[in-house]
Amino acid sequence: MRMGPDLLVTLQGDLDDRAVEQIEQEITDQVARTSARAVLVDVSGLAVLDSFVARVLARLVSMVRLLGADATLVGISPAVAITLVELGVSLRHVNTALNAEQGMVRLRRLRDGEASRWTSHDDHG
Amino acid sequence: MTITVDPAPSGDLVRTVVVVTGESDLLDVRSALRTAAEQVRLRLTATTKLVTAGSELARNILRYATGGQGTVTIEVSTTGAGRGVRAVFADQGPGIADLEEVMRDGFSSGGSLGIGLPGSRRLVDEFTIDSAPGRGTTVVISQWDR
C-alpha cells in the first residue's frame, strides 16, 4: 500500500481575495491528486491574515479533512495571533503549530497514534 | 486604483488617497496603511492591527457600497501629541439604518461572519462611524504609538 506524500504549502506576500480562493482550490486539487496524507500550510510570509483569509483557511482545512488528510496551519506570528483574537476570529477547529518543524512533529504524532490504533485493532481481529 | 500622495508644505502631514473600485485596490489600501505605519514607526503589533482593520473596512466598501466604490484617505501625524496614522473610509453607498445593530458581534447582512465592524473597532485606538440611509458611510480609525 502506497502512502501519499506530505504537502508543504508556503503562502507568500499580499494576496487579494481571489488569489486566496485560487490557492484554496489548488491545494484541495493537489491533495486529491497526490492522495496526500498531510498538508502543512505556512502562513508566516502572508502580509495580512484578516477575517476573509482566516475563513478561507478554515474552509480549506475542513475540505482537506474530507479528503482524508490532516491539515495544519503553521507560522502564525504573535502579532497576527493577537490581531486574530481581537478581531474575533477563533480558528477553533483548525490545527495550528508554531512553525513547519513543529507542524511535522504534530502530524507524525497524529499519524503514529492512528497507526497504533489500527495495530491494536488487528491484534484483536 | 489611483494613489495620490500630497505632501503638505510643512512636511509633517502626508495624505494618501486610495480610490477603491475593485478587489485589487484592497492591496493598495493595505500597502498604503503599512507604509504610513512604518513612516511613524508604529510597533509591529499596532501595525498588524491597523492594516488588518483597514483590510476589513476596505472590503466593506467593496461588498456594500454602491458599485463597490469609495475612497480611503490615509494621513500620518508626526507632530503634536504623538505619532500616529489616521484613515478615513468613505463611500456613497446605501448607508446603515441601525448602527448599533451592525456594531454588535455576529451581525452580518452580507453572508460573512459579521465581525468586520466590531472586530475592526477592537483593533484600533480610535474608531468612529457615521452613517445614515441614503447618505453613505464614513468610518474613521486612528492608531497611535504608545
Image: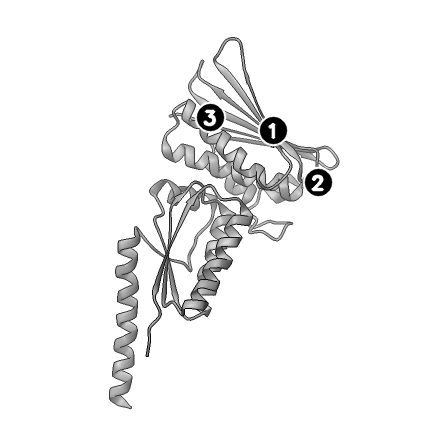
Q: CA distance from mark 2 to mark 3?
A: 27 Å
Q: Which residue is mark 3?
A: B36
* Name of the residue lying farthest toward the right: B134
Q: Is residue B88 left or right of residue B66?
A: left
Quadrant containing the N terminus of chain B in the rendered view:
top right
Residue B8 higher or lower than A43, as above or below: above
Q: Amino acid at mark 2?
A: Gly
Reading the chain from its start, which is encountered first: label 3 or label 1? 1
Q: Determine if residue B66 is in view.
A: yes
Residue at point 41% right, 58% down?
A: A94
Residue at point 30% right, 63% down?
A: A107
Residue at point 41% right, 71% down?
A: A68
Image marks 2 and 3: residues in contact by CB distance under 8 Å: no
Local SS, label 2: helix
Where residue A41 appears, as percent x and y from the top left, is 38, 55
Where residue B136 appears, as percent x and y from the top left, is 70, 34
Q: Amino acid at mark 3?
A: Ala
Local SS, label 3: helix
Residue at point 27% right, 55% down?
A: A102
Where residue B20 appears, as percent x and y from the top left, is 62, 34
Q: Is residue B137 left or right of residue B37?
A: right
Reading the chain from its start, which is encountered first: label 2 or label 3? 3
Marked residue chain, label 3 = B
Q: Amino acid at mark 1?
A: Thr
Q: Which residue is mark 2?
A: B67
Q: Nearer the viewer, mark 2 or mark 1?
A: 1
Local SS, label 1: loop
Bin the neighbour count of mark 1 within 10 Å (Cα to Cα): few under 14, some 14-19, many 20 and up: few
Q: CA distance from mark 2 to mark 1?
A: 17 Å
Quadrant containing the C terminus of chain B in the rendered view:
top left
Q: Which residue is mark 1?
A: B2
